[in-house]
Image (cartoon, rainbow, N blue to C red):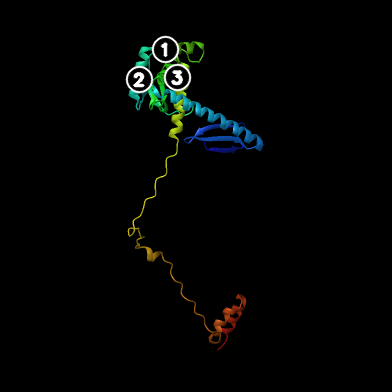
Amino acid sequence: MQVLIEESKKLRRASACIRDGGTIHVKLPRHWPRTLKHSVTQELVERLQKKDAKERALLGKAAQQETVTITDNPTLTAFVQAINAETFQVPLGKVQIGTAKYNHLAQVNLKTKTMTVSRYCLNQAPKAALRYLIVHELAHYFESGHGPRFWALVAKHVPDYRLQSRIMKAFHHQAVIQEEAPSPLPEAPTVKAGYASQPKPTAFAPALAPKPKPAAVKTPRNNRTPKDKTGLWPGFVKQLLLWGESFKP
């Protein structure tokens, strides 16, 4: 796997995750010593690689299970209602598809009775694992926390809930990674010979061209008149010369 390291002044502890189709992103505090950065990065990368290998092996064993694909809210609602009818039979509210990537695979709002399931859990998902996820959320109608009574409710309808929970979490994580994989760049279009586009002249082109400046014409020094000579002196001398010219007959 490719490893990208990012350092920041604001960070106080290190973290790492898998993104972009399998790239490990490591974030480190900038003020840490170089040896500490190296050791922590190595530890985090090894931990994530082991986790990824376990998830792939687990999904490989679950590949023989029946899968289900749900793409819209009505289909998801019917799926949840069927599971609710055979398990808890709670008063259901709205059921909808969400977009959670990293926090919640599914969640229930106990005030509005709304259940939201991440779309990353619904594309060719193992049916038994998805059923466990729905039972998990339905059990929250009776127990809001994750204490012993809550898990007893879940185990009543899903005896192997620990295994199905691991499968569902691995499936969700791998689905997020695969969707974030960068798509290949499109090939550049080929241009046939003789069809290359040429810039067309516009009607405003002559107006935009700079106008040529007229050439300066210099008068020879010997042919200058007395008034022309005043241009060779400072301003106060010009006034004196012009004043003197006015008294000549």
Q: What separation in Å lies between label 3 and label 1 (alpha carbons)?
A: 12 Å
Badge 3: few (under 14), some or many (20 or more) residues near its Cα, within 10 Å? many
Residue drawn at point x = 53 percent, y = 28 percent:
50
Callout 1 amino acid: His
**Quadrant into which the C terminus falls:** bottom right
Q: Does 5 sit left or right of 124 as displayed?
A: right
Residue drawn at point x = 49 percent, y = 10 percent:
149
Disc on the earlier residue, 3 or 1: 1
Check the image and report above or below for 193 versus 77: below
Pick the front one: 205 or 186: 186
Q: Quadrant of residue 68?
A: top left
Residue 23: x and y in percent read: 51, 36
Check the image and report above or below for 179 versus 67: below
Q: Determine which residue is flagged by label 2.
A: 79
Residue drawn at point x = 57 percent, y = 31 percent:
46
Check the image and report above or below for 187 versus 133: below
Q: In the structure shown, which secondary structural element does the residue marked by tag 2 occupy?
A: helix
Is residue 245 in sight in this rendering?
yes
Pick the front one: 205 or 193: 193
Mark sitting on residue 157: 1
Between tags 3 and 1, which lies in front?
Answer: 3
Pick the front one: 63 or 19: 63
